[in-house]
């Protein structure tokens, strides 16, 4: 008698593979939420940084005042960059994030020389839900230099 060898997986092999996959997923799942929240905070702080850089360069290029203005409800609801009432860029709201200006300002303005008209300010970016995420502080100097550090703005 000649026995044919079957190709493929047995049911036991398939069940063991699925069990290993489920265990690894259950171990990784709690860390995924905090990772996503951390990335949202970093993205928001990078958007603030790039907005300041863009507004400053446009002010110099156009030799005109360029404003970064928070949307109604504050910075967490997004902002727009405009010159003479014409919008250049818009940023949408950030879900589950709080962005607050230290001076409670709603506008940052750059003059034609590239220096801030409104003065230096800083923004605290943090999650709205309580978790173990450390807030980020995005500080904007009068020259337009931006630094991001861990922790709330002092």
Image (spheres, rainbow, N blue to C red):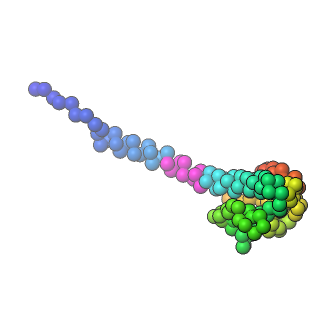
User: In the picture, residue 8 is in which quadrant?
Assistant: top left
User: In the picture, residue 73 is in which quadrant?
Assistant: bottom right
On the rendered structure, is 45 left or right of 37? right
Please give the name of the residue rendered at 17% of the width and 30% of the height, measured from the top-left corner.
4
| Position in image of residue 91 (x %, y %) | 67, 62
Q: How many marks?
A: 0
Residue 128 seen by the camera? no
- Residue at the outermost bottom position: 72
Please give the name of the residue rendered at 74% of the width and 56% of the height, measured from the top-left corner.
51
Please give the name of the residue rendered at 83% of the width and 60% of the height, measured from the top-left corner.
64
On the rendered structure, is 43 left or right of 112? left
Please state, as top left, top right, bottom left or bottom right, where the C terminus lies in the image: bottom right
- Residue at the outermost top position: 1
Magenta segment's dominant SS is: helix
On the rendered structure, is 17 left or right of 119? left
- Residue at the outermost left position: 1
Residue 144 seen by the camera? yes
Provide the residue span drawn in magenta.
25-34
Residue placed most toward the observer, 116 or 149: 116
| Position in image of residue 63 (x %, y %) | 83, 57
Residue placed most toward the observer, 63 or 154: 63
Please give the name of the residue rendered at 65% of the width and 55% of the height, measured from the top-left corner.
40
| Position in image of residue 118 (x %, y %) | 87, 63
* Membership of 72 in magenta stretch: no
Residue placed most toward the observer, 62 or 107: 62
Above or below, 28 relative to 73? above
């Amino acid at each position: 008698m000649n026995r044919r060898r079957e190709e493929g997986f047995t049911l036991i092999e398939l069940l063991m593979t699925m069990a290993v996959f489920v265990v690894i997923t259950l171990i990784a799942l709690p860390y995924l939420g905090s990772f996503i929240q951390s990335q949202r905070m970093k993205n928001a702080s990078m958007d603030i940084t790039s907005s300041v850089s863009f507004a400053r360069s446009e002010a110099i290029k156009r030799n005109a005042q360029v404003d970064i203005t928070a949307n109604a409800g504050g910075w967490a609801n997004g902002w727009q960059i405009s010159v003479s009432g014409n919008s250049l860029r818009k940023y949408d709201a950030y879900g589950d994030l709080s962005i607050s200006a230290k001076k409670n300002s709603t506008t940052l303005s750059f003059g034609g020389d590239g220096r801030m008209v409104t003065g230096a300010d800083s923004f605290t970016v943090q999650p709205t839900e309580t978790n173990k995420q450390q807030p980020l502080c995005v500080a904007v100097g009068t020259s337009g230099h931006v630094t991001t550090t861990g922790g709330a703005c002092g």
